[in-house]
Amino acid sequence: MKNKLLVVGTMAYDAIETPFGQVDKILGGAATYISLSASRFSLDCGIVSVVGEDFESQHLSLLKERGIDLSGVEIVAGGKTFFWSGKYHNDLNTRTTLDTQLNVLQDFNPKIPEHLKSPDIIMLGNLSPDVQLQALGQLKTKPKLVVLDTMNFWMEHFRPALGRVIEKVDVISINDEEARQLTGEYSLVKAADQIHKMGPKYVIIKKGEHGALLFHDNEIFCAPALPLEEVFDPTGAGDSFAGGFSGYLTQTGDISFDNMKSAIIYGSAMASFTVEKFGTKNLVDFSPTSMAERLKAFKELTTFEIEIE
Amino acid sequence: MKNKLLVVGTMAYDAIETPFGQVDKILGGAATYISLSASRFSLDCGIVSVVGEDFESQHLSLLKERGIDLSGVEIVAGGKTFFWSGKYHNDLNTRTTLDTQLNVLQDFNPKIPEHLKSPDIIMLGNLSPDVQLQALGQLKTKPKLVVLDTMNFWMEHFRPALGRVIEKVDVISINDEEARQLTGEYSLVKAADQIHKMGPKYVIIKKGEHGALLFHDNEIFCAPALPLEEVFDPTGAGDSFAGGFSGYLTQTGDISFDNMKSAIIYGSAMASFTVEKFGTKNLVDFSPTSMAERLKAFKELTTFEIEIE
C-alpha cells in the first residue's frame, strides 16, 4: 500500500511575462505544481481545490494521467478559474503582480472527499488561511505531518487566521523576506526561533537562487540551489519545491530530521527543473535519468572533506 | 620546512558604525585581516604593505606575535596610515563609505624583500591593480598559485590595469554583484564562464550570508555561510575568508579542486569568526577548540544522504 498525500491549494491560469518571452494563458496554481511534483514519487496523491467551467479537460487529463486523484476538485458551473498575471523583472528575483482575479476562489469552501480524509501527510499550499483551517478541520485522523506554505499577502492582511493555521502545523515553508516580516527579526536564526515558538517544529526558509535552510531545535541544514545557466520562469518554483519535499516524505514515510534533509534536496531538484521552462512544462517532461543526474549534481556541489582535530 | 605565503595589501585604521555600536579608530586593512587569518595555519607568512608614522607599535606587535614577517611593511616617516570610515545599514548587507583618506597609500610602491620573493602562494589583497602588478613583477620564481581579491571600485575606474592583473592570476575572489559587473552576465554560471576566459582557472564568487561558490571548468562547489544569531560587524569578512583560503592551501601545499573546497570551508569559518565582533578582535581571540566546533557545524549543515538510482 502506498502512503497518502493530500494537497490543498489553488488551480489557476497564469499569464506570465519574463525577459525571455510571455504567455497569455498557461496552467498554474499551487496545487497543480505541488501535485505534479509530488506525483514523481511512489504515493497516492489527491487534490482538494476549485476550478471554473472554463478549466480545460486537457489539463484535468494531464493531472489524471499522473495518477493524481481529482475527486476533491470542485468544478463550479458557470464559474471562472482563478487567474493570476505577473511580470518578472530583469534579475528574475523580483516580480510585479499585474492582475489577480479570484473568480471561483472567492467563495471556495473546501470539501475533502471521504476517502481522502486520512492522509499520511497533508500539504497546505499557499491559499487563504481560512480555507487551510477548514480543510484541516475535515480530516478524520491526525496526519503524520502537516506542512504549510504561505506568503506575505496573508501575513499583511489575514494575520490572526494565519496565526491559527501556523500553530497547527509541523512544518512551515516561507521565503527569507517573509520569515523576517512574520517575526520582525532580521537574523534568520532568530526568526526561525520565533517561528518555532508559534508552533512549527520545522521551519524551512527558502532563499531562491541561494537555496534553502531547514531549522529544527538547534539543528540547521543548508541546501544550495543548483547554479543554473539560465532561469527561464521562476513561477511555481516554491510549489514544486513543496511538492518534492512532501512527496519524498510521503513515499518514504520517514519524517526524521535526517530524512527531511534529503526531502529538501528532492524539493530543490524539482524547483530546478520547473524554472528551466515556462509554467509546468519541464516539471511534466523531465526524465528519471535527468533526475538522477541532478541529485548527483547536488551531491557534488556540497561534498567536501575536512579533518577535524 | 613550512610553505610560504606572501600577502600584498593595505594596512589601515578604520572608523566603523554598525547598528550595534561604533568605533573611531580600529586596526583594519586587507593585509591585516588576511595575514591574521592565515597565521592560524602552519606556514611562513609575510606582508608587503605601507603604513604611516602614526601606526601604533602595539599593532605591529600584534602581528609579529602571530609570527607574521613585517620586513616588507614600509613605514613612511611623517606619513599617515590609510584611513577608511564606513557605516553599515540595518540589514548589515549594505554600507556607505563615509570617508577614504589614502594617505601613504597614494604613492605606494611595493618593495618585496629578497627573502620573500619566492612564495609558494601569493595572495593579492584588494588594492590598486597597478600595485598588484608591480608586486607580481618582483617575484623571483613563479608561485604555485596566485590569488586575487579585488572590488567594484577598480572595475569602474581602473579596468585596463585590472584586466592585466586578472589575466595573470589563477584564482579570483569577488562578490556576486562584482562578478555581474565585471562580465555583464546576470547568471553567475555564465559570469564565471566569462571570467575563466579572462584568465583565472578558479573563480570564487562570495555571496555574504548566502555563502560562496567555487567554479573550475565544469565543476562547481557551493559553500554555505554559517547561519549566525547576530552579525556584529561585517568589516574584513572577505579578507578573513581570503586569509583562511590561502592559508589552508599554503599549509597543505595541495592546490587540487578537492582541496580548494576544503580551503573555502576554512575561509568561511574564518569569516564567521570575524563578523561576530568589531574589527579583528575575534579573529585574534578565537580558540582552536571553537575552530574545530565551527568546522563540525559546517559539516553538519551540509551533509545529507541520497540514494541515486
Image (cartoon, coloured by chain):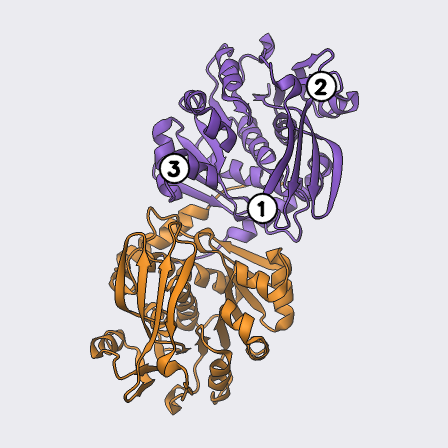
Chain colours: A purple, B orange
Question: Residue A14: which quarter of the image?
Answer: top right
Front label number (3 vs 2): 2
- Identify the mark nearer the N-term, 3 or 2: 2
Residue B300 placed where, x, y %? 40, 46
The three-letter amino acid code for the residue at tag 1 is: Asn
Mark 1 or mark 3, whichever is nearer to me? 1
Residue sitting at x 33%, y 60%: B274
Between A41 and B55, the one lying in front of the other is: B55
Relative depth, front residue between B118 and B100? B100
Pointer 3 chain: A
**Numbered tag placed on residue A192 in the rendering:** 3
Kindly state the secondary structure of the residue where label 1 is placed: loop
Find disc 1 in the rendering and name its residue.
Answer: A93
What's the CA distance linking mark 3 and mark 2?
Answer: 39 Å
- Residue at the extreme top: A114
Tell which subunit mark 2 falls on.
A
In the displayed structure, B297 sits above or below B262; it is above
Quadrant hosting residue B237: bottom left
Inter-mark Cα distance, 1 to 2: 30 Å
Q: Where residue A47 appears, x then y in whole percent?
A: 62, 19
The residue labelled by disc 2 is A80
